[in-house]
């Protein structure tokens, strides 16, 4: 994940990075000391999510939650590792973001397959909404920022989605988790669309 340490915290992810910076740096420094590279940790995080997806499909939800939690921590540290090594780059942040999307979506589709195996169509619809919402949250931000708008707001960014999904796996209540994500992720996308709209109108007013 791209670091946001030098900007004002706006989302829960930003606050986590801001207030947990010292702990993240210590853990990242330890991984650097072991000889691991940031890209290696990013790749390990992706492999962890693939393994978690396999566990979900097999029905081992609690273990899937544990693996997802550990893999998410690796995703949290790779940016700090790159910064401490003086190797931060735009391309590295790009690869990291793309990997994050793959990690998240492979897990969602595993959860959908889990419900499909049990003929739980209602929960499958919840997963589909969660995937749509997650895509739109990321897309609206990327598109808005490409046009010069600030879009880092909303109740359910990626970190919040994990905060909902991981306990849903650990406590064996995945249906509740995916429906919470499905509703709130799409609400977050709408929040961001409205936020960009307000900025666009304010910009037009200043130009008149």
Image: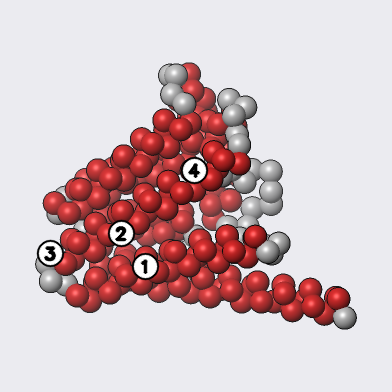
Q: Position of residue 89 (x, y in %)?
A: 61, 37
Q: Position of residue 54 (x, y in %)?
A: 20, 48
Q: Quadrant of residue 57?
A: bottom left
Query: Label 4 crowding class (10 Å Cα cut-off): few <14, some 14-19, many 20+?
Result: some
Q: Position of residue 181 (x, y in %)?
A: 38, 67
Identified at 51% across, 70% down, the residue is 189
Count of numbered circles on the image: 4
Whole-angstrom CA distance, mark 1 to mark 2, is 8 Å
Whole-angstrom CA distance, mark 4 to mark 2, is 20 Å
In the rendered image, the vertical position of residue 41 relative to residue 30, given as above or below: below
Identified at 45% across, 72% down, the residue is 186
Query: Label 2 crowding class (10 Å Cα cut-off): few <14, some 14-19, many 20+?
Result: many
Name the foreground residue: 128 vs 24: 128
Sooner in the amino-acid sequence: mark 1 or mark 2: 2
Sooner in the amino-acid sequence: mark 3 or mark 2: 2
In the rendered image, the vertical position of residue 168 relative to residue 194, given as above or below: above
Whole-angstrom CA distance, mark 3 to mark 2, is 14 Å
Disc number placed over residue 117 in the picture, else none: 3
Pointer 3 with pointer 2, Cβ within 8 A: no
Disc number placed over residue 130 in the picture, else none: 1
On the image, numbered disc 2 is attached to which residue?
108
Q: Nearer the viewer, mark 4 or mark 2?
A: 4
On the image, numbered disc 4 is attached to which residue?
95
Horizontal side, residue 41 vs residue 82: left or right: left
Q: Position of residue 161 (x, y in %)?
A: 41, 59
């Amino acid at each position: 994940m791209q670091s946001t340490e030098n900007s004002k915290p706006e989302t829960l992810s930003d606050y986590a990075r801001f207030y947990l910076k010292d702990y993240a740096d210590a853990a990242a420094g330890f991984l650097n000391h072991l000889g691991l590279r940031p890209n290696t940790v990013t790749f390990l995080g992706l492999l962890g999510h693939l393994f978690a997806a396999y566990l979900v499909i097999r029905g081992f939800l609690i273990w899937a939650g544990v693996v997802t939690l550990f893999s998410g921590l690796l995703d949290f540290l790779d940016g700090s590792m790159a910064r401490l090594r003086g190797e931060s780059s735009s391309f590295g942040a790009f690869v990291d973001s793309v990997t994050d999307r793959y990690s998240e979506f492979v897990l969602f589709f595993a959860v959908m397959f889990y419900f499909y195996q049990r003929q739980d169509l209602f929960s499958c619809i919840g997963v589909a909404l969660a995937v749509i919402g997650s895509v739109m949250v990321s897309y609206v931000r990327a598109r808005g920022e490409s046009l010069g708008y600030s879009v880092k707001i909303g109740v359910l960014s990626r970190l919040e989605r994990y905060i909902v999904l991981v306990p849903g796996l650990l406590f064996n209540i995945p249906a509740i988790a995916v429906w919470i994500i499905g509703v709130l992720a799409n609400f977050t996308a709408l929040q961001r669309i409205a936020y960009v709209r307000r900025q666009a109108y304010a910009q037009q007013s200043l130009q008149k």
